[in-house]
Image (cartoon, rainbow, N blue to C red):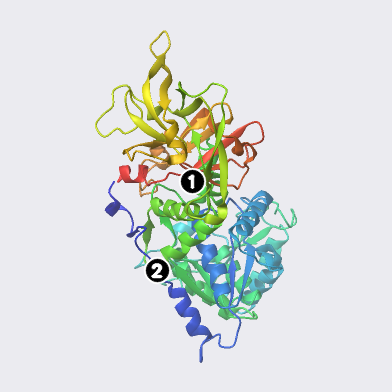
Amino acid sequence: MSASALKGTIISMDEQTGNFIHDIIEEDTGPGGRFEGKTVHTRFPPEPNGYLHIGHCKALCIDFGSAKKYGGLCNLRMDDTNPAKEDVEYVDAIKEDIQWLGFDWGDRFYYASDYFDLMYECATELIKKGLAYVCELSPEQMREYRGDVNTPAISPYRDRPTEENSALFERMKNGGFPDGAMTLRAKIDLSSGNFNLRDPVLYRINSTPHHRTGGNRRIYPMYDFAHPIEDAAECITHSLCSLEFEDHRPLYDWVINNCTLPAKPRQTEFARLDMTYTVMSKRKLRKLVDEGYVSGWDDPRMPTLSGLRRRGFTPVSLRNFCERIGVSKAASTVEYSFLEHCLREDLNENAERVMAVLKPLKLIVTNYPETKTEEFKIENNPENESAGERFVTFSRELWIEADDFTETPEKKYNRLYPGNEVRLKSAYIVKCTGCLKDGEGNITAVTAQYDPETSGGNTPDGRKIRGTIHWVDAGNCVNAEVRLYSNLFLDPDPDGADKDFTKFINPDSLKTLTGCKMEKKLETASSPMAFQFLRLGYFSPDSKDSRAGRLVFNRSVALKDSYNTAAR
């Protein structure tokens, strides 16, 4: 599928957009604004039914970033109004991810369940005002009676007397009816063109035990009723949410205006983040986990923050990414390569360079003394002088990449082949003299001779050497496993309409290499350290599987955008 077939505008690494939310905040807090003289107060309200993903990262940067920019506050609130799907595991993971990104909520950590009593009071207030009633329609009947754009909805229980509604609602709360038998509905407008206002459900009966309040609660508020009450109770000024809640805003305002609450927040919607080669739905991400397509929520191929962190993404790269894609109401799809570009920028400046050989082939320098070992000085990061230098050892037997030798070179192949010279990074120029093979004709080693006058990169006679390759001293290295990751999906839009996203799983999204050879200094590497393996990409030790004696590195990002370019 071409990029033009994806939803909305495609945002590439060459584009940046603005932030209309900051314009709204400045207007609201300026002279004559609805929040003039007040502290900007936002909130981030995730539902603890899964792990945060890159889309949540955008919302985090908007919520926490806006508060920070205007010297305000941002609350963290767990939207735990649905006990059937929530778990304390997700609460802990969400807090860890947010702190890792560099955001701090201080002592402003809340749960929606903190306000269950207030929500019940608001519901009874609406009943007394004649603005809510108990309905006995089943979900199927409610859909049947919902009407259409030309036909009003129907509710035969809409005109129950206030006293009867109050008594029934009390019985609902006390467990007097089975799950699903009744709901509490708002009395708004059955003929509204906005179906969210056609007497929406405010409470439903559900006897599932809650992870915080236990099994003593029989009714739970719906999100559209609970959320404005939570915002108002915390005196939020700007309730920032994704665009799918735009049609729900009239209901948000209706609840705020008809319940006795301490504040009147303003809801503003922004376009959610969509990204190529990715799915964002928690339901679909959970399916990937539950059905074994990935190893868990923190699988490095997942768009979850824990997966990106394990793969080697940095907080700075993710915050820069969210800042640069901007905030608007227009639907857009961001290229995954732009996310990689932001990581590559950060690591290029900050990651130490090392030499590692992923597909090792022995190089024997036949005219180098068998018992001799010497050291060469190499810069740790040419982009950052403060990173200093290190010494690597050189001896008669080295490891090189298997791809750096061929017996029959193609045109413009500038690496090792019989008769050709290359420079070994920061060491000597060597000339290939041939190769050794086993009884089946497989190449087991390459032979070469070195020029002792070219130590440390010198070329006394000025001859031109077209190729430079990396290497590792065979007598002074460590073994490691390396995991090469690419897109989990082959289709740039696996989440498109009428698609089964599991049909587009990339069977080569993970390639595992064993027996890789690396500089000795890497034997103490641990997460979240990051390295550029020269000529190969940026790598980070796996936070779960890598340990002393069993090194495991994940490729965080290639040196260049290769597989996305090919896909386009």
Q: Is residue 536 visible?
A: no
Q: Is residue 57 above or below residue 160?
A: above
Quadrant of the rendered image containing residue 419? top left
Q: Relative to the observer, which residue lies in front, 264 or 6?
A: 6
Secondary structure of the residue carrying tag 1 is helix
The x and y percentages for residue 547 are: 65, 36
What residue sits right under mark 2 in the picture? 329
Identify the residue at the far left of this view: 411
Residue at figure coordinates x 51%, y 92% from the top left = 32
Quadrant of the rendered image containing residue 477? top right
The x and y percentages for residue 319 are: 51, 61
Q: Is residue 524 above or below residue 8?
A: above
Q: Is residue 336 visible?
A: yes
How many circles with numbers are drawn on the protein? 2
The x and y percentages for residue 252 are: 53, 73
Q: Relative to the observer, which residue lies in front, 499 or 97?
A: 97
What residue sits right under mark 1 in the picture? 284
Q: Relative to the observer, which residue lies in front, 495 or 428?
A: 428
Relative horizontal placement of residue 489, taking residue 524 as reference (left or right): left
Amino acid found under the numbered disc labelled 1 = Lys
Q: Give how far apart the Cα atoms at labels 1 and 2 are.
A: 24 Å
Identify the residue at the far top of this view: 439
Q: Is residue 329 above or below residue 281?
A: below
- First of labels 1, 2 by sequence position: 1
The x and y percentages for residue 181 are: 61, 56
Q: How packed is label 1: few (under 14 Cα within 10 Å), some, or many (20 or more)?
A: some
